[in-house]
Amino acid sequence: MDSTLPESWRVFFWDYDFASLRQEANRECVIGRMLSHGTWDAIAWTRNTYGDAAIREWILRHEGRCLTSEQLRFWELVLDLPSGAVDAWIAVPERKIWEGTGSA
């Protein structure tokens, strides 16, 4: 059975039909949302549920999109992400607009 998400996470998925979200069926969405907006407890749950390998694959596949520079540096250390790739993702001009550090 594909489990539902913890009720306390409803706030993170305000733009979804929360009752219809499932751990496995929506894993891409859940991992991304928890990495970008989750609390430490939510991130711990995500790591325990999906594993670090799945989180690492998600970050690599999405090239760090939706994560701040600080979040990327954290995951670079924790998951041994390739520093050259992380440097390149952080250097993307569009990221500076979203992070308020300049213009593209």
Image: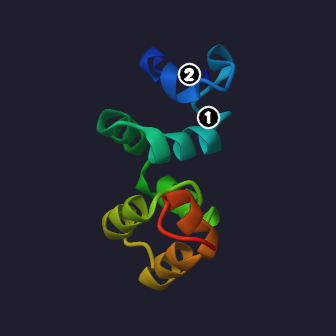
Q: Is residue 75 above or below residue 4?
A: below
Residue situated in front as seen by the camera: 89 or 44: 89
- The image's colour scheme reads rainbow
Circle 2 is placed at which residue position? 3
Labels 1 and 2 touching (C-beta < 8 A): yes
- Secondary structure state at the residue bearing disc 2: loop
Residue 80 in sight = yes
What numbered label is drawn on residue 50?
none
Could you classify mark 2 by the number of other residues whose Cα lies within 10 Å: few (under 14), some (14-19), or many (20 or more)?
few
Viewer-side residue, 61 vs 64? 64
Residue projecting furthest to the front? 103
Label 1: which residue?
24
**Residue 70 position in % (x across, y down):** 37, 62
Q: Quadrant of residue 82?
A: bottom left
Q: Is residue 50 something one can see in this rendering? A: no
Task: Tell me if mark 1 has few (under 14), some (14-19) or many (20+) residues whose alpha carbon lies within 10 angstroms of its own.
Answer: some
Mark toward the start of the polypeptide (1 vs 2): 2
Q: Residue at x 54, y 61 (%)?
A: 59
Q: Secondary structure at mark 1?
A: loop
CA separation, marks 1 and 2?
8 Å
Q: Quadrant of the C terminus?
A: bottom right
Residue sitting at the far bottom: 84
Instruction: Say which amino acid is labelled 1.
Output: Glu
